[in-house]
Every structure is written in structure tokens, then in C-alpha cells.
Image (cartoon, rainbow, N blue to C red):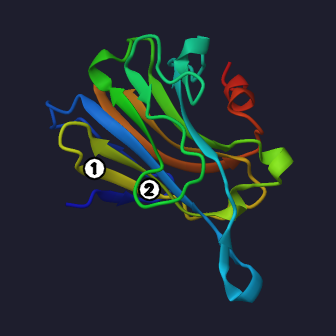
Amino acid sequence: MAGINLVKGQKIDLTKGKAGLTQVITGLGWDPVASKGFFGRKKQANIDCDASALLLDENGKLTKETNLVCFHNKQSLCRSVVHSGDNLTGEGEGDDEQIKINLSIVPADVHKILIVVNIYDCVNRKQDFGMIERAYIRILDGGSSQELVRFNLSDSYAGMTALICGELYRHGGEWKFSAIGEGAHAVHIDELARRYT
């Protein structure tokens, strides 16, 4: 069964009425745009996108370095957020990277989990999100792997080197998901993370 498709700016309850939903998987996918090469063959650039999660407090601040989960820090100190590892090309079907979140053990001082994507070494490689297509973020039930929510990032992100995809956040004792889909200029995840300190 397919999940609910969201558009930019929409929010949805994840846990309301689903008492057993404690583990979710955030799946992110993208494909490099194919360009015509010699003899009409399609050629794809090798674009290394990196998904990351920022665990933010109630004021939207990143208060600890260990609350940044990314390719060089694959697990939060509390072990509630775990990164699947780095996909260097974006090729193939399905999710390119996943971030697993155990909602039941997210520390009480973490109110938002912001999911972002950067292009690795974007300046030297002269790459931006205008060279990516079919990008999406989706939330899966960690137990059944059933897709709950999908948000296709269909805006034009030409010139942007980072994407703020969406966030899981606490509200009234429940967890919700917000589809953000904003482009940003940040050449590295650490640069993007500093905006939240």
C-alpha cells in the first residue's frame, strides 16, 4: 500500500492513533539528470548526495555536535537516530540513503529531527541540485517497512547545494512530519549545521 503523498508545506500526524509506531525509517532518493553524450548515448554525472539528520531543541537549535547524524557521524549519542551509510552515486532503484529513527528513545530535549541533503564536494565538481531529478523523501514504518508518507521534491533547485527536505517534530505528545522542500547554499553539512547553532 502506498503512503500519503504530501505537497510542500503540508504536515501530517505520524503516530496519532498508531500506538505501536515507535520506529520509522526516513528514505531519501534521487537520480542524476542524464545528458546526451557522444552518439546520442545518455551520460549521467556521478553526484554524491549526502543525507543528514539534525536533532534540534524546542528553539530549533543544534545544541550538541553529537546531534548531527551524517556520513561521518552515523549515530546519535543516544542511539535513537542511525544513518545507513553513504551512497556515492545515487544510481539504482529505491532509497539511496536511509536514516532510522527510534521515536521511543529520542531524548526529551530533542523536539525536531530535520532531514537535509548536501552534495559532497559540490564546488570542485561544479555540481548543484539542478543536476538531480526525481528526488524524494519518504517515511516508512520501521517494523513493517510500509510507506506511510512520501514527498516528491519537484521544485527547481538549480544553483542550490543543499536541500532541507522535511522534519519530524513533537506536537502534543505525538510525532508529526512536515514537508519543507527548501533549497539552500551550503557547501558542506557542517556549514549548514552551523546555521542552527
Q: Quadrant of residue 154?
A: bottom right
SS under mark 1 = strand
Which residue is pictured at 74% across the width and 52% down the height?
Answer: 160
Residue 63 appears in the figure: no
Q: Is residue 161 above or below residue 115?
A: below
- Which amino acid type is shown beneath numbered disc 1? Leu
Residue 148 is tagged as: 1
Circle 1: is it few (<14), some (14-19), or many (20+) Cα within 10 Å?
some
Task: Tell me: residue 84, above or below residue 93.
Answer: above
The quarter of the picture where residue 21 lies is: top left
Query: In front: 146, or 20?
Result: 146
Label 2 secondary element = strand
Residue that extends furthest to the bottom in the rendered view of this protein: 39
Name the side, left or right, on which 174 lies relative to 70. Answer: left
Q: Position of residue 145 (x, y in %)?
A: 24, 45
How many numbered dots are placed on residues in this image?
Answer: 2
Q: Residue at left 14%, top 30%? A: 19
Q: Residue 156, position in %: x, y?
A: 67, 64
Q: Identify the image quadrant of residue 35.
A: bottom right
| Other-residue count near label 2 (Cα within 10 Å), few / some / many at <14 / 14–19 / ≥20 | many
* Percent of width and height locating residue 134: 53, 65
Return the mark for residue 58: none
Q: Quadrant of the C terminus?
A: top right
Decide if residue 170 is on the left or right side of residue 52: left
The type of residue carrying mark 2 is Phe
Residue 155 showing in the rendered view = yes
Depth check, front residue: 122 or 105: 122
Q: Residue at x 55, y 54 (%)?
A: 90
Question: Where in the figure is residue 96, as x and y percent of width and height?
Answer: 48, 50
Disc 1 from disc 2: Cα separation: 11 Å
Q: Which residue is mark 2?
A: 151
